[in-house]
Amino acid sequence: MSAALIDNSDPLDRQNGKLLKIIEVLMRRVEQVTDDGGAAYAHFERAVILEDQISERTRDLEHALDLLNDSNAQLAQAIREAERARSDLANAIETIQEGFALFDSDGRLVLHNSRFGMYMPDLVAELRPGLEFADYVRHASQSRFLELPDMQSRGDWAARRMQLHQEKHVMFNLNLTGDCWVQVSEHRTRDGQTVILQTDITDIIRLERRERGKLLDDQAQLIRATLEHIDQGVCIFDRSGQLRGWNQNAGSMLSIPISRFRVGIEFDVILRRIGSDFEIEGGLSAHDIAVWVGAQDRRAPLRFYMRSGTHKTLDVFARQMPDRGFVISFSDVTAERAAARALAHANERLEQRVRDRTLELEDALAKAERANASKSRFVAAASHDLRQPLSAARLYLASLQEELASADHRVLMDKAQRALTSVEDIIDALLDISRLESGHVEVDVTHVPLRRITDQLIDEFAPIAAIKGLDLRYVPCGAMVESDASYLRRVLQNLIANAIRYTPSGKVLVGARRQGRNLRLEVRDTGPGIAPADQDRIFQEFHRLDAHVSAAEGMGLGLAIVDRACALLGHPLELRSDLGCGACFSVTVPLVSVARSGPEIRGVGGARARASLEGRIVLLIENDPDLRHALTLLLRGWGADVVEAGNLLEALTQLADLGLSPDAMLVDYELDEGVRGPEVIARIIARHGVIPARIITGHLVAEMHAHCRAAGLEVLPKPIDPAELEVFLKAAVG
């Protein structure tokens, strides 16, 4: 009910009056009502409680009224302070020397000072709060006090001004009538408002003009002094081709009196003087220069030389300036030209000396190459000449060995055979070193079956290892590798021989390991090992670590040959060893394919069973009588019937007389009168059918191997190894 009777919007006095009236009515009503059950007291009690509530409400209302009064007083104070601050701000911006204006974030004018409109008086009437910035720019662009640059309309100026307004911070100069200048600075505040400051810079601009004029005068004097002190002659022309500046060196170089130089003379006058006294070089003429001067488009720099007799040469350089004028400089290069001519003469003399020296060096190189070739030919010829008697000696010894019954005599025969073998090895090593040093070695890289080489080498070295009491072990490998068969065999032969020679006891292991697309061929031994400090020296010629090894066992050429042959073939060579730990030499060769190979490690040793040649006919064609006789004795000792001849005609005659066809042929590669073994074999096969044949020769050169390989023939090198000869004959007679 109280909520309906009391209006909170009424003043407190009115509300209090209403409450007192209500209390009075309630009290009167309580007194008039009679209630025997104590209802009157209950009404009285409720009235008292209501009175307390009314009193508390009254106090709250009084407190709220006090707070409201304080708030009203504070608001009034804040309004007074805001008005005072606004007045102070207006007074402050009015006192500053620049024009000031503030636009809100919506682009409306908030306030400005009187100086903001003083630069454009016809704009003052439009400057009032709420003015849009675009309207302000439009009015300013139409002001009669605004001076616009050439070729710029008032609309263009307004568009440019609105474009600048998009920047957060911008500054530009405004040109007004009466040669007045105002610098306008416009900045954006954090809340998006725009502050504009206008500063009168007329005095600064005028002072700058005076200083610039003074500076230009000083610069002109400085330029004049510079022109007079440089070595070049300089002439400056304007865009119409009239002279505007020069220095004394220009007159001196052109031989024109200084009195003839004056401002405004045409370039044609100077050009005529140049054409009469100078000869223009470089394919240009006076007309070409005049065309360059009169060109209307942009001119590229022009350079040419002028010569007056033989005593003066000028370097002329002309360049266009930004205002389409041009500058021409003249440099006296007479001394430089003379020095260049002298240098050219000196160069010619030097080149002649270089040519003469080159010819001398070429002659010396040719002599050295001829000497080297002569040495190689000598070594090859000597090796061939030595191989013939060595081969005969070995064959004689082999045939005698069959006839010896005494064990002592057989021992002596074995020693003689080993001595001849050592001599043969030394000759082969010298020939290999000679070929490798010559630099003209040709290799024939083909697909080489590795087992064909290793099996032969193991069979060759097994008896030697057995004599020393060494366990020579071999891991067969049927891989196919890319290499030169002859050089690869020589490399492995030297490595195995080296291992056997320097291993006093234990074993030597020959095998291969696959590494991706390569095959690593290894020769391991249980010898004394090689110290790291000596591992490079052992590959040098005639260098042996074991001084107690006799010359008959090698001259220190084996590893040198291995090193150079591997380098020639491109096969990496590696040594892993240390003192007391044996040694492992390895050669890595490209792998073609791998065939099945026996996984077992087999020991080798012992002698092969000799093939029976009883009743077999062997044709021997050899033009060296001693070697032919020795071979005949050996073959007949093995039970063969030998038809021996010195040439093709003799062989064909004997075969025809006997009415026989041979079971096998041994033919020397190089016979008399330039006849070659492959052609001889082809003639005999054409008459008697296919017959197993071997070429025997001491000329182990690449051309010989290529010739024999093309004919499908294999080679038995001299000195002939009886074991290899026996293997061939065994296969031939089947």
Image: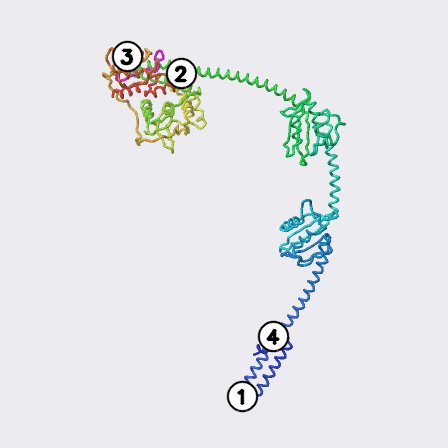
Viewport quadrant of the N terminus? bottom right
Identify residue type, mark 3: Leu
Residue 334 seen in the figure: no
Task: Give the secondary structure at mark 1.
Answer: loop
Task: Give the secondary structure at mark 2.
Answer: helix
Residue 696 to residue 91: above or below: above
* Alpha carbon separation for disc pair 2 and 3: 31 Å
| Mark 2 or mark 1, earlier in chain | 1
Task: Give the secondary structure at mark 4.
Answer: loop
Residue 695 to residue 315: above or below: above
Residue 139 to residue 418: above or below: below
* Alpha carbon separation for disc pair 4 and 2: 138 Å
CB within 8 Å, label 4 to label 1: no
Which sits in the foreground, 501 or 160? 160
| Mark 1 or mark 3, earlier in chain | 1
> Can you identify the residue that label 4 sits on?
8
CB within 8 Å, label 2 to label 1: no
Location of residue 84 (image quadrant): bottom right
Task: Give the secondary structure at mark 3.
Answer: helix
> Can you identify the residue that label 3 sits on?
652
Q: Position of residue 688 (x, y in %)?
A: 26, 16
Counting every numbered tag in the picture gives: 4
Location of residue 596 (image quadrant): top left
* Alpha carbon separation for disc pair 4 and 3: 155 Å
| Mark 4 or mark 1, earlier in chain | 4
* Alpha carbon separation for disc pair 4 and 1: 35 Å
Viewport quadrant of the C terminus? top left
Q: Which residues are magenta?
A: 662-674
Identify residue type, mark 4: Asn
